[in-house]
């Protein structure tokens, strides 16, 4: 019985660690020209958006494309990090 309790406790701690790590996931990307920097959380929600003076030379369409493309790239990074955490967690739980 003690062994079972200890195993369940370890699994609970692993779940808590996973949740903490998932909350900390961020993805950050910069546009090719450096005019836009976007950061998103592990759910893909925008947490930071920065612009350089370079945006003043962009058309509205170019600006929109730069923001959307950069934010999407940041989200991909965050989702890849989340996936790596989940995969590592699953491997540990299976092992």
Image (cartoon, rainbow, N blue to C red):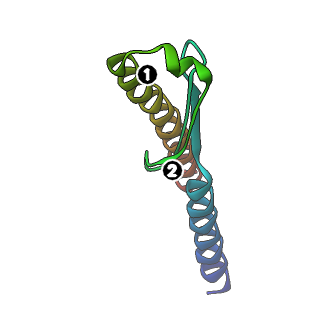
Element assignment for label 1: helix
Residue 9 locus on image (x, y percent): 63, 77
Q: Is residue 33 left or right of residue 65?
A: right
The residue closer to the viewer here, 54 or 71, is 54
- Quadrant in the picture for residue 19: bottom right
Q: Residues within 10 Å of mark 2 (few under 14, many from 20)?
A: few
In space, the residues marked 1 and 2 are separated at their CA atoms by 36 Å
Q: Nearer the viewer, mark 1 or mark 2?
A: 1
The residue closer to the viewer here, 67 or 89, is 67
**Residue 74 numbered mark, or none:** none
Q: Is residue 47 above or below residue 64?
A: below
Residue 50 locus on image (x, y percent): 58, 35
Element assignment for label 2: helix
Q: Is residue 5 above or below residue 41?
A: below
Q: Earlier in the sequence, mark 1 or mark 2?
A: 1
Q: Is residue 22 above or below residue 74?
A: below
- Quadrant in the picture for residue 23: bottom right
The residue closer to the viewer here, 59 or 6, is 59
Q: Is residue 36 above or below residue 24?
A: above
Residue 27 locus on image (x, y percent): 56, 38
Q: Which residue is mark 2?
A: 90
Residue at image point 43% right, 28% down: 67
Q: Quadrant of the N terminus?
A: bottom right
Q: Residues within 10 Å of mark 1 (few under 14, many from 20)?
A: many
Q: Are marks 1 and 2 in contact (CB under 8 Å)?
A: no
Q: Which residue is mark 1?
A: 66
């Amino acid at each position: 019985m003690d062994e079972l309790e200890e195993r369940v406790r370890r699994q609970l701690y692993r779940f808590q660690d996973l949740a903490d790590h998932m909350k900390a996931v961020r993805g950050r990307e910069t546009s090719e020209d450096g005019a836009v920097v976007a950061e998103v959380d592990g759910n893909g929600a925008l947490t930071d958006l920065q612009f350089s003076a370079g945006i003043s030379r962009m058309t509205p369409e170019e600006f929109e494309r730069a923001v959307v493309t950069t934010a999407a790239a940041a989200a991909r990074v965050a989702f890849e990090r989340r996936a790596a955490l989940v995969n590592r967690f699953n491997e540990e739980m299976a092992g």
